[in-house]
Image (cartoon, rainbow, N blue to C red):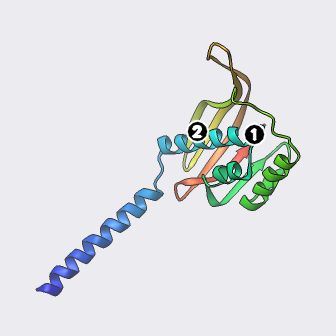
Amino acid sequence: MKAFIFSVILTGFSFIILSNSVMANDCDEFCQLEQVNAYFSALDKVAKKGSTSSDVDALLDLTHDDVKYVHVQYEANFTKDSWRKAFLRNIELSRYQKTDKNQIRILNSIAGKNHLAIEYSHGFIQENGDWEKTEKYLAIFGFTDGRLSLIKELW
């Protein structure tokens, strides 16, 4: 009888672990939008004057280990490691000069299977607190195991 009870408890425990694992990998449109917003917020920090390797690491920590960053026009095709090196090179060359007034915001999104098409804009927070957008851009974000695994810029 003890073996049977132990078996039932073990089976139930295994089911809970498996369910939590599946749920952790399941990322619906709301979850994906939260991740893209977190990505843009972290990207804003990296693009600011005085950003550091810690800011780059915080950005890349939001992504899947096998993330790919692709920028069609600039022919960029980075892995996580090569993307990190590119960010650090730009920091070293003082290319990032934005301030706390700069902010990226999502304007529109369309969900697909494990992907989001995102229309976004860089912008400036005005003295009165209003955000003024600049040009609009398009990017595709892909998700694997519930994490950002593709950022493809289409501008």
Q: Nearer the viewer, mark 1 or mark 2?
A: 1
What amino acid is found at the position of numbered circle 2 in the picture? Asn
The quadrant of the rendering that contains the N terminus is bottom left
In the image, farthest residue toward the front: 50
Q: Is residue 55 visible?
A: yes
Q: Residue visible at 62% across and 55% down?
A: 61
Horizontal and vertical percent for residue 143? 58, 53
Q: Is residue 150 visible?
A: no
Q: Secondary structure at mark 1?
A: loop
Q: Residue visible at 42% across and 63% down?
A: 21
Viewer-side residue, 68 vs 89: 89
Residue identified by numbered label 1: 47
Q: Quadrant of residue 47?
A: top right
Q: Quadrant of residue 130?
A: top right
Distance in Å between CA atoms under marks 1 and 2: 15 Å
Horizontal and vertical percent for residue 108? 60, 30
Horizontal and vertical percent for residue 27? 48, 50
Q: Residue visible at 79% across and 59% down?
A: 82
Residue identified by numbered label 2: 37
Label 1 or label 2, whichever comes before in sequence order: 2
Dot 1 and dot 2 residues touching (CB under 8 Å): no
